[in-house]
């Protein structure tokens, strides 16, 4: 069972009600970097409950959207989104698609859950058409250092508690009442090495800010990172 299956209902409710930092920052930047996707064949990796796939479909794409959470896919399928096929699939496996099947690959906030990025980018490269593009976002790894406080230091007279940014590790956090959420902390250089060494070039790298005047953590700090790549 996928970890999101354990709290799919709460997750869907939370994503619909919370201060929509994703919809205000991460997703607008994804769309900006994707540009005109009308008529393109698009693969959405870790599509969740299908809200982004709905927007891609409205923009005239033919969408294949996969996620390893059966419950989220069931929810997504009920939306009856035109030109969109949802599949339960674990993206750490070999993709069930032929070479050069897609013009565009997208993925929002999924790769921070994965330990190995090398085989993932190899598969993405294989199923993308020549010069196809890939736009993906991750949560900034600088902010995933919980439970690993290794020391304190004074910087400009202020005490700073710090973790170990460089240590690759699984982080398990409590989520909601009883569930847990797992991530694999990886330094930022791991993302760059994984795509640069597996057939991609970097076209753009952005740190989106929410489009709101509210002064919150997310407006002042780079919570999200968004990459645009091209198949070499
Ligand atoms: C933070 S949510 C993002 C969902 C969606 N992309 C969005 O932005 O609304 C992460 C998603 O990645 C999916 N996921 C995590 N590991 C996965 C894997 N190995 N294969 C497929 N999906 C995975 C989860 O089930 C979850 O739906």
Image (cartoon, grey):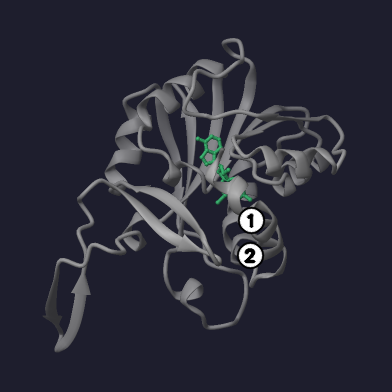
Please report the residue visible at 67 percent of the width from the left and 37 percent of the height from the top.
Answer: 70
Please report the residue visible at 44 percent of the width from the left and 44 percent of the height from the top.
Answer: 113
User: How many other residues sit within 10 Å of disc 1, few (<14), some (14-19) or many (≥20)?
Assistant: some
Asked where in the image residue 16 lies, by quadrant, the reply is bottom right
Secondary structure at badge 2 equals helix
- Location of ligand 1 given as a quarter of the image: top right
* Relative height, residue 117 to residue 139 (above, below): above
* Relative height, residue 217 to residue 141 (above, below): below
Of residue 160 and residue 218, the one placed in the foreground of this image is 160
Where is residue 229? Give x, y as percent. Answer: 47, 34
Question: Relative to 157, is 195 on the left or the right?
Answer: right
Of residue 115 and residue 59, the one placed in the foreground of this image is 115
Return the residue found at the far front. Answer: 178
User: How many other residues sit within 10 Å of disc 2, few (<14), some (14-19) or many (≥20)?
Assistant: some
Of residue 78 and residue 230, the one placed in the foreground of this image is 78
Where is residue 98? Give x, y as percent. Answer: 60, 10
Asked whether mark 2 lies closer than 8 Å to ligand 1, one says: no
Question: Relative to 58, is 63 on the left or the right?
Answer: left
Quadrant into which the N terminus falls? top right
Where is residue 180? Give x, y as percent. Answer: 47, 56
Residue named by callout 2:
24
Residue named by callout 1:
28
Q: Which mark is residue 7?
A: none
Asked where in the image residue 83 lies, by quadrant, the reply is top right
């Amino acid at each position: 069972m996928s970890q999101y299956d354990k709290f799919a209902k709460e997750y869907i409710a939370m994503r619909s009600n919370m201060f929509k930092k994703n919809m205000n920052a991460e997703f607008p930047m994804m769309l900006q970097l994707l540009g005109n996707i009308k008529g393109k064949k698009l693969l959405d990796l870790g599509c969740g409950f299908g809200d982004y796939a709905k927007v891609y479909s409205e923009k005239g794409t033919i969408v294949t959207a996969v996620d390893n959470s059966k419950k989220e896919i069931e929810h997504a399928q009920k939306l009856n989104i035109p030109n969109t096929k949802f599949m339960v699939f674990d993206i750490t496996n070999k993709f069930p698609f032929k070479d050069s099947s897609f013009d565009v690959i997208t993925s929002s906030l999924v790769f921070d859950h994965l330990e190995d990025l090398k085989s993932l980018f190899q598969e993405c490269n294989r199923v993308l058409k020549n010069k196809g593009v890939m736009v993906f976002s991750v949560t900034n790894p600088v902010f995933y250092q919980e439970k690993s406080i290794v020391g304190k230091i004074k910087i400009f007279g202020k005490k700073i508690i710090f973790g170990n940014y460089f240590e690759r590790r699984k982080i398990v956090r409590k989520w909601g009442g009883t569930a847990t959420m797992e991530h694999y902390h990886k330094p930022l250089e791991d993302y760059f090495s994984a795509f640069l060494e597996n057939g991609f070039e970097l076209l753009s790298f952005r740190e989106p800010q929410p489009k709101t005047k509210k002064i919150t953590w997310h407006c002042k700090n780079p919570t999200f990172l968004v990459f645009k790549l091209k198949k070499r």
